[in-house]
Amino acid sequence: QHVLKLKRLNDGKVISLLEVKDPTVRVLKLLRGEVDILQGDLPPELVKYLKKQNAVNVQEVAGANFSYLGFNCQDKTLANLKVRQAIAHAINRAAIIQQALVGGTREAGAILPPEHWAGNPDLPAYKYNLDMSRQLLQEAGIQLPLKITYKTSTDPQRVRLATIMQAQMRDAGIELEIKSLDWGTFFEDVKQGDFQLFGLTWVGINTPDIYAKAFASDNIFNRGRFADTHLDALLAKQDWKAATSYIHQQLPYVPLWYEGQFAATRNDIQAYTPKADGNWDDLAQVTRRH
């Protein structure tokens, strides 16, 4: 929701950060030269449109910010591993990435990407398999349709993604009821455990400590209230490969994708490249060509 205007003052950079919520307005401001850099939070259709404009340069890179679905593991239905697996197999990640996400987005198998020093490249994304999803629900003794409430924010892109997943899951016999809430209410519900299923993105995660925070039985950041003594022991030993493999198997959350990153700049802006986690570090060296 932010764009940047760079100005010159006594040969130094002055950076103005402008908050503009409407994505179309952000694009128009860039094209009119009212701003110089636009990064993140655009639907793919507008990114594709910018690529065709002569006045701007669009760069896309593979992302590292991790999107996922969180389960309330104390919920009677979702406490059943087979139900969680069925939901994971009912999502066509490849189709969502192609239809609704920017370039550089890739399917995820764990919080940290496989190239991270504590990543686990042996963990694949859960495959889209409707037959397996239905079979797992049958084995779990679920009477179809399975009705699950999914909470998300009112951000249009998050609602769009939720709606696509709703349509996909319906084919597996899962009825997803979407509740979109203002950010404050939504995140408070997540913190309080007032949900069945929710969607979020972890941004700027660089260390494997996130696994202990998110999944250790006694950690306050364990939003899904997942409790497993075997996992606690692996986390205490900091055996990240074994811990991530076990998390992948037990599925206290559904890994979705690492969101791609892009930056659109006016053609006279130099030395700016988007980063995998969407940070703005290159502003320290950005210049304007005269």
Image: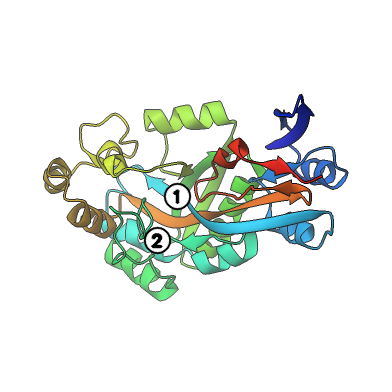
Q: Residue furthest front?
A: 11
Residue 95 in percent (x, y) is at 56, 68
Q: Quadrant of residue 278?
A: top right
Residue 41 in percent (x, y) is at 65, 45
User: Going from the N terminus, do you reach mark 1 or mark 2 first?
Assistant: 1
Q: Is residue 85 above or below residue 234?
A: below
The secondary element bearing badge 2 is classed as helix
- 142 on left or right of 276: left
Which quarter of the image is occupied by the N terminus? Answer: top right
> Which residue is depicted at the point 27% across and 53% down?
80
Q: Which residue is mark 1?
A: 66
Amino acid bearing label 2: Ala
Amino acid bearing label 1: Phe
Q: How many marks?
A: 2
Q: Is residue 182 above or below residue 224?
A: above
Residue 92 in view, yes or no: no
Residue 220 or 88: which is nearer the viewer?
220
Q: Residue furthest right?
A: 32
Residue 100 or 10: which is nearer the viewer?
10
Q: Is residue 260 above or below residue 237?
A: below
Q: Quadrant of residue 128?
A: bottom left
Residue 288 or 146: which is nearer the viewer?
288
Measured Cα–Cα span from mark 1 to mark 2: 16 Å
Q: Residue furthest bottom?
A: 131
Q: Which residue is mark 2?
A: 88
- 85 on left or right of 250: right
Residue 208 in percent (x, y) is at 29, 45
Res 204 label: none
- 13 on left or right of 168: right
Q: Residues within 10 Å of mark 2 (few under 14, many from 20)?
A: many
